[in-house]
Amino acid sequence: MTTLALGPSWLDPDYLLNQFGLWGLLVIVFAESGLLIGFFLPGDSLLFTTGLLITTNKLDTPLWLACLLICLAAILGDQAGYLFGKKVGPSLFNRPDSKLFKQENVVKAHDFFEKYGPKSLVLARFVPIVRTFTPIIAGVSGMRYRSFITFNIIGGVMWGAGVTLLGAWLGNIEFVHKNIEAILILIVLVSVVPIAIEFLRARSKSKKAMAAEGAPGTAPAQQRGRHAKR
């Protein structure tokens, strides 16, 4: 089966599964779950495609085994991220930007973790980029390991098995089966929507801040007070 990839062909789920099979999938899930370099990988669309290809007999792996191994890879990936965060600590926030590392991603994950607490480990699984950095932030913040492992397992199973089973279930629907290429493209689009929204929000905030700083009559209150006294 061939699909129209959005972006580089090596990020196309169908291409990745054809080239690297189940073991390549597990490495990608592990990397995206807790390694800094894995934030750009297509986790959601890859899991969905796996379930879809299994149910349409285009991937020769039992569905139960794929779900089990995917969940295990996701849980171990978060575990690696947590241990990395615990070792690196606050210095992560001082790390300079590079092609594969952006400080703003750490800040977003930190804000997400602060807002939702331990359950962020479950919610973040369904948010691209944030899911990679959240377990690392949990380690940096010194989250209790017992709480971490509990929510890590819950999130890993809900995301790993849930998205894969959703792909398998929809793969049995005749309309989906006949329009696999369109469905895969739709999944890729949906998975990048949160990233696009966050980008537009950040850009909008940045423009507003710059406009506020450059607008006339916006001098600091202290400075305005001095002028008033004169």
Image (cartoon, rainbow, N blue to C red):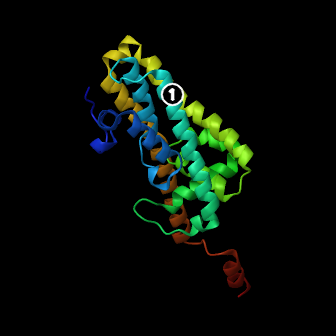
Establish if 216 lies above or below 125.
Answer: below
Q: Residues within 10 Å of mark 1 (few under 14, many from 20)?
A: many
Q: Residue at x 57, y 64 (%)?
A: 92
Residue at the spot of label 1: 67
86 horizontally vs 16: left or right: right
x and y percent of residue 125 in the render? 56, 40
Determine the image quadrant of residue 183.
top left
Q: Position of residue 47 (x, y in %)?
A: 45, 32
Depth check: 3 or 50 in front? 50
Identify whether 201 is placed above or below 174. Answer: below
Q: Quadrant of the C terminus?
A: bottom right
Residue at 27% across, 33% down: 4
**Callout 1, which amino acid?**
Cys
Which residue ends up furthest to the bottom in the rendered image? Answer: 230
Relative to the observer, which residue lies in front, 111 or 32? 32
Which quadrant holds the N terminus? top left
Q: How many marks?
A: 1
Q: Residue furthest top?
A: 174
Residue at 41% of width from left, 13% of height from top?
Answer: 173
Residue 159's spot in the image, x, y percent? 55, 33
Tell me which residue sits at (30%, 33%) in the image: 18
Instruction: Please state the horizontal and vertical placement of residue 120, each as a whole percent of the image.
Output: 65, 43
